Amino acid sequence: MRIIRIKKGNLEKRLRGLRGEASLSDRRIEMSVRKIVESVRKKGDHALFEYTKKFDNVGLSPRTVRVSDREFQDAEAKVSDEIKSDLAIAAERIKDYHEKKLPQEKTFTDPLGNELGWILRPLQRVGVYIPGGKAAYPSTVLMTVIPARVAGVEDVVLATPCPNGEINPTVLVAAYMAGASAVYKVGGAQAIAALAFGTWSIPRVDKIVGPGNIYVTIAKKLVFGAVDIDMIAGPSEVLVISDGSVPAGWVASDLLAQAEHDEMAVPILVTNSSEFAEEVNLEVSGRLKNLRRRNIAKEAVKNRGRIFVVDTLDDAVSLSNAIAPEHLELCVENPKALLPKVKHAGAIFLGSMSTEAFGDYVAGPSHVLPTGGAARFSSPLSVYDFLRMPSVISISEAGFRELADPVINLAYTEGLDAHALSVKARLDE
């Protein structure tokens, strides 16, 4: 990893190359994705199955595109009792966290006697995309389906690639455990289009959530408006702030935990100790050799891995705020002292025991988080993403009389005569 000494005034220069590498405006890729999306929108199943045959080498039909009860049973038999137990622990913790996060309906009466408030209504149908390329992620099934179910979504369907006719059995077990309504054996941009516009085999949804590669991400961007989406996600990121009070090997392992996701992943350490920076760098090199996904992790460390050395921990937090990382670990002696200074992060892990891997699996909050600096303006996936909050307005007679003139005057100011007349009609009669 590159060790960089940060001086005041050169922060933005030093951050170049860490953000915006995976462009979502690649015209060649976008043209390709747009063609797929439009083809599925117009031709439905015919285009969907054609692309699935082309990209995943599997022939599907309306009868076979949905995972059958028998396929669920076969998957259940292939997954060990230990893994099923671990999934159940994670599922229960995720459910408990999101139940506690549920907002409440409220109605109040203002001094004029008007009743105002909001009610909660869940989305009706949600589509969850689960990748199936370099790795399968049953944990992501739990992290997306369970919050939707807790929110009260009636129908939660999964789409996941089925390369050469195979789906990771643990993904299916997780889908069943989380309460998915159906699982469809389709992936890529064609799956996003099918969920957004509907086909004969796959009914359209109201919102699409879940991570994917650049083709999936661009497809989500293109269908936004026809449906809602959770976010435009990029490569995974972790930023660790450490004062050298924890073993260098622990921090190195946390950096590699993100690096093994993808060659474009962003592992960053910020420390106020030059000596600790060197120790972590050596640990990363040594531990990298033992990873099964070492080739992927090696590329991420080489391309976007950074160790920044700063003067103070306050400087470290300032640098973190400038990056707005997906995951932020505060591996320092007193993490809660730094927490109030953190402005932008997707998920914040306090203390040396709070390794980011806990957030990925069993802590409770969803691991679907804003990336690429989006933590400046967005939040982790949660029950809020699956709820609508319609306003409720009941105007009293006293309130009508008191507020009628302001409404009429403002309506005339904006040139909206009918708005004003709708109030005057009630005053005159």
Image (cartoon, rainbow, N blue to C red):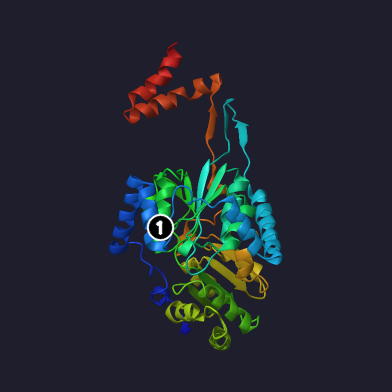
Q: Nearer the viewer, residue 421 or 137?
A: 137
Which is nearer the eye, 77 or 207?
77
- Is any part of residue 7 visible from this angle? no
Name above or below for residue 418 compared with residue 38. Answer: above
Residue at image x 36%, y 49%?
46
* Residue 356 location, quadrant: bottom right
User: Could you tell me residue 173's position as x and y percent?
Assistant: 62, 58
Counting other residues with Cα less than 10 Å from the Cα at mark 1, is it few (<14), some (14-19), or many (20 or more)? Answer: many
Residue 376, horizontal then vertical, whole percent: 48, 60
- Classify residue 85 as left or right of residue 188: right
334 is higher (above) or lower (below) than 378: below
The residue drawn where x is 65% and y is 61% is 77
Q: Is residue 108 above or below residue 203?
A: above
Using the rendered image of the protein, determine whether residue 393 is visible from the camera's viewpoint. Answer: yes
Name the image quarter holding the C terminus: top left
What residue is disc 1 on? Answer: 52
Q: What amino acid is found at the position of numbered circle 1 in the picture?
A: Thr
Picture coordinates of residue 152, whole percent (x, y): 60, 43
Q: Position of residue 268 (x, y in %)?
A: 51, 76
Dividing the picture into quarters, in which one does residue 218 lie? Answer: bottom left
Above/below status of 202 relative to 397: below
Which type of secondary structure does the marked residue at label 1 adopt? helix
Report the front residue among 268 and 5: 268
